[in-house]
Image: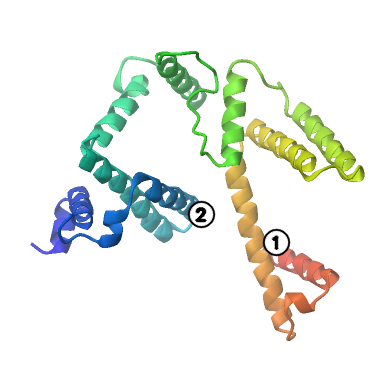
Amino acid sequence: MTMADAAESGAIEHLLEIMRRLRAPQGGCPWDLEQTFDTIAPYTIEEAYEVADAIARKDMVALKDELGDLLFQSVYHAQMASESGAFDFKDVVRAICAKMIHRHPHVFGDAKVDTSADQTSRWEELKAKERGAKPGPVSALDGLPAGLPALKQAEKFQKRAARVGFDWPEAKQVLDKIDEEIDEIKQAMASNASTAKLSDEIGDLLFAVVNLARKAGIDPGMALRGTNLKFDRRFRRIEELLLAHGKKPEQSTLDEMEALWVKAKGEEAR
């Protein structure tokens, strides 16, 4: 049987075997053999971002590839855990299957859920019960990974606090808070406040903007990623337009580039 045939007949098993071969003490890859959970973790995070990027760009070909890379990260961690006797890939699969069945009693049991909002509420109730079953003091903020990207962490904090009543009822109040935070930044800059003070005030503003996105039902990280892609696209167009006149950005004035930005923006609106 060829490698291609093996992949077709049992894709996951084939992937697991590739991973075992890479980590085999005899005949394995020297680089892979040197890796640990700590050294692989940054790659895992990077692959998750690349999945999000492919989604933001609506690139299905890239998404297929990036999802494969992300799956490989799970296989990699499971293989290393298997080598230490902690768990293996099948244990990972069993655990996630059990969790999904437990958290969807309306699908796999007799519970009744009418809307997506109801399901979200039930899901969080089940997660809260799971956290409450653990020993020690319980906080509404328990269980949130410290390593989450800052925007996502802020959103998670706010959602958890909102579930126990610590939340503004209307988005307008969040807008007022954003205005307040902007005023505080202006005051800090006018008084030549320290970098630490200014950083604190800008952090407060970002936290309030994340809150506004949450109230609007928008993922702040994906919103910013979309804006980043838009900036990338428009700035590259500025460079193209300047190059047509034999110039580079560093050889142009801000007014020139602003005018070309407006032109690039107008081209997209057609």
Q: What is the quadrant of the C terminus in the image?
A: bottom right
Q: Quadrant of the N terminus?
A: bottom left
Q: Which residue is mark 1?
A: 269
SS under mark 1: helix
| 134 relative position to 6: left or right | right
Residue at numbered disc 2? 53
Q: Tell me the quarter of the picture where residue 153 sits.
A: top right
Relative to 38, 81 lies left or right? left
Q: Is residue 1 above or below residue 242?
A: above
Amino acid type shown at disc 1: Ala
Taking 209 as reference, is 230 above or below it?
A: below
Disc 2 to disc 1, how far (Cα)?
23 Å
For image coordinates 39% across by 50% down, the residue present is 39
Q: Amino acid at mark 2?
A: Asp
Q: Residue 232 location, x and y as percent?
A: 63, 63
Residue 171, position as x, y percentages in the image: 73, 29
x, y (%) of residue 254?
83, 69
Label 2 Cα neighbours within 10 Å, binned few <14 / some 14-19 / many ≥20: some
Q: Is residue 194 above or below residue 131?
A: below
Which residue is rendered at x = 66% and y = 31% of the image?
215
Residue 128, visible in the rendered structure: yes
Q: Earlier in the sequence, mark 2 or mark 1?
A: 2
